[in-house]
Amino acid sequence: MQIQSKQFNNAQLIPHFVELLNQGHTVTFKLRGFSMRPFLEDGRDCAILSKHTTVHRGDAVLAEISPGRYVLHRIVNIDGDKVTLRGDGNLNTEQCSLADIRGIATAFYRKGRSTPDYTSGRKWRIYSAIWTRLLPIRRYLLFMLWKVHIKSV
């Protein structure tokens, strides 16, 4: 049997994910983009999302930051209804409202593993705590990671 793979752009596919999340399903999909580096890689890792009931600072969420434009980023601040997001591989932030958050990441399949890393698990929480505290020097760390990745390709 031959396996065929098709790729769709996020603008076409993510609204279907949101619909499934709203119906109470979980959604697993392969990640696209580099905004969550160094923990999550484009085309390699998969996210498991579910509908959120509450969100907190540090949660990785799927948010619609403008009509039809979705990001899977970490919450860095919540001020009333205003939510500030930043991808782990980004220096800049994005804004949305609490109503614009479509789902929350509960786990990730990383590095081709068959068992997920749960966002509630100890390993993910330790990685996240360390990385988010490195924000002042993140620019330099990301630059070094980018250089190593380019040389290895």
Image (cartoon, helix red, strand yellow):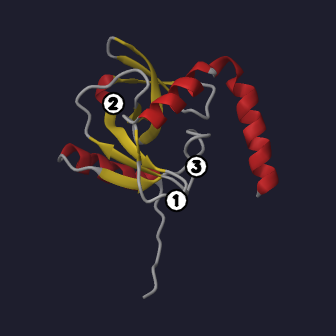
Q: Amino acid at mark 2?
A: Asp
Residue ranking furthest to the front: 122
Give left or right: position of 142 versus 79: right
Determine which residue is flagged by label 1.
112
Q: Quadrant of residue 66?
A: top left
Helix, strand or loop at mark 1: loop
Which of labels 3 and 1 is toward the front? 1
Q: Quadrant of residue 145?
A: top right
Q: CA distance from mark 3 to mark 1?
A: 11 Å
Tell me the residue at 48%/36% (across/down). 123
Which of labels 3 and 2 is toward the front? 3
The one nearer the camera, 117 or 54, is 117
For mark 2, does the 10 Å Cα neighbourhood hold few (<14), some (14 to 19), or many (20 or more) residues? some
Determine which residue is flagged by label 3.
41
Tell me the residue at 60%/25% (across/down). 92
Q: Amino acid at mark 3?
A: Glu
**Image quadrant where one finds the C terminus:** bottom right
Residue 87, x across and y down, in percent: 54, 33
